[in-house]
Image: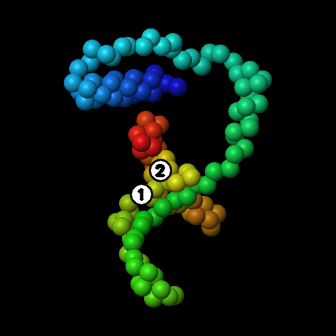
Amino acid sequence: MSEDGMDDWAAAMAEQAESEAEQDGSNDDVQVAELDELTDDAPITQEEKKKLDTILDIPVTISMEVGRSQISIRNLLQLNQGSVVELDRVAGEPLDVLVNGTLIAHGEVVVVNDKFGIRLTDVISQIERIKKLR
């Protein structure tokens, strides 16, 4: 992980500690934990590689969302060929890229060899994804 990623993580943890201290009314009970710095120097052991290979083969569902709309069942049943459903997005706005229903990025539609694809324009940071899980 880059130093910027660690700085972002440290800043988020400090912000959370301050928020919790404000809610408690005092920060006398707060203790700073001394943690070892993570490094990428250690080589991956064969056992770790085997574990990593196991999760790398787990299938996930990736989907792109153009927009959403809520309609009544009555209106849903009236839809037929040629019907238009208005979405909550403006034309030209980036699409959401979801993995197993969790937003991970924004992108734009592209066509490659007569097939649709998506070019990622903004990837959601790990910190933001963790915040959305709460």
Vertical side of 99 occupied by 127: above or below:
above
Vertical side of 87 occupied by 7: above or below:
above
Vertical side of 21 occupied by 122: above or below:
below
Q: Quadrant of residue 53?
A: top right
Distance from the alpha carbon under mark 2 to that under mark 1: 13 Å
Q: Quadrant of residue 115?
A: bottom right
In percent of the image, x 33 and y 29: which residue is there? 16
Q: Is residue 20 left or right of residue 64?
A: left
Q: Tag 1, which secondary structure?
A: loop
In percent of the image, x 72 and y 26: which residue is there? 48
Q: Nearer the viewer, residue 16 or 27?
A: 27
Q: Nearer the viewer, residue 18 or 129?
A: 18
The x, y position of residue 5, in whole percent, is 45, 27
Residue 94: numbered disc: 1
Badge 1 crowding class, 10 Å Cα cut-off, few under 14, some 14 to 19, many 20 or more, is: many
- How many numbered marks does the figure carry? 2
Kind of residue indicated by mark 1: Pro
The x, y position of residue 104, in whole percent, is 49, 47
* Residue identified by numbered label 2: 103
Q: Where, quadrant-wise, is the C terminus in this rendering?
A: top left
Residue 85: numbered disc: none
The x, y position of residue 102, in whole percent, is 50, 50
In percent of the image, x 78 and y 23: which residue is there? 46
- Is residue 10 in view from this perspective? yes
- Is residue 84 in view from this perspective? no
Q: Quadrant of residue 94?
A: bottom left
Of label 2 and label 1, which has the lower sequence position?
A: 1
Kind of residue indicated by mark 2: Leu
